[in-house]
Amino acid sequence: MKNDYIKTGRTNQKIETRSKILISAQYFLNNGLEFNLEDIAKRSGISRATIYRYFSNVDILAAEAGLDVNTKSSETIFENLKGKTLENKILEIQDYYNTLAIAHEKLFRKYISTVLDSSTPTPKRGARRKKTLQLVFEGTEYTQKEKKDLSNLLTVLMGIEPLIVTKDVCGLNNSESTELMKWGMELLLKGFISSKK
């Protein structure tokens, strides 16, 4: 139990630290002020070295802070899904993130471009989609591996990345893209659910 508690505490502490960094960056963005990582360190009371572990440069931080302003927390999304079937919960999560991606497509594309152009070997991102799906699967009787695999797989069918593929590679418009992703999600869920019977 102690090990689990320590892991949870450390995870929560990392989430809290990341949140403080984003809130500090949002202060500068909301006030139209230029800033660097040193400014964020002073405002948040977090060392520059720690901030660098989360965001390798100020452009990545600014892009993510801008996106974070417009995105509901995983917990808020999950709360709004109570009383719905598992399939409807997942489809509504998908719809939320796809609608968000379309509404802020330019900002998301800029963010991805900034992250990919950075020198960070493995860029870390918010992973809200995955976390939201994990909350939905917590109360199910699926195995831990199934919950993990489903959260990872279903994340692939929502958000900016599949939108870019369906639009840029497949030549679809926003409506066609979201319909295709929804159809894919329904097929995956149907196949998985029928395999469990």
Image (cartoon, rainbow, N blue to C red):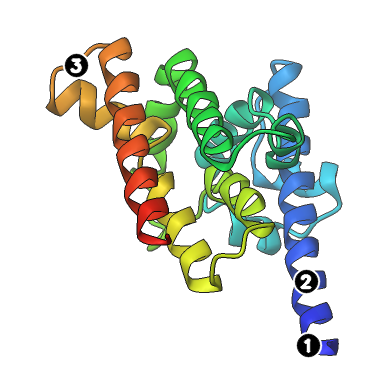
Q: Position of residue 80 (x, y in %)?
A: 74, 29
The numbered mark at residue 3 is 1
Residue drawn at point x = 43 percent, y = 32 percent = 159
Q: Name the residue under label 2.
A: 8
Q: What is the CA distance from the residue labelled 2 to the residue labelled 1?
A: 9 Å
Estimate how packed mark 3 is, as few (under 14), some (14 to 19) or many (20 or more) residues with alpha carbons within 10 Å: some
Q: What kind of element bears circle 1?
A: helix
Residue drawn at point x = 59 percent, y = 35 percent = 89
Q: Name the residue under label 3.
A: 172
The answer to whether residue 110 is left or right of residue 164 is right
First of labels 2, 3 by sequence position? 2
The relative height of residue 136 versus residue 49 in the rendered view (above or below) is above
Q: Nearer the viewer, residue 64 or 167?
A: 167
Estimate how packed mark 1 is, as few (under 14), some (14 to 19) or many (20 or more) residues with alpha carbons within 10 Å: few
First of labels 2, 1 by sequence position? 1
Estimate how packed mark 2 is, as few (under 14), some (14 to 19) or many (20 or more) residues with alpha carbons within 10 Å: few
**Identity of the amino acid at label 3?**
Leu
Q: What kind of element bears circle 2?
A: helix
**Identity of the amino acid at label 2?**
Thr
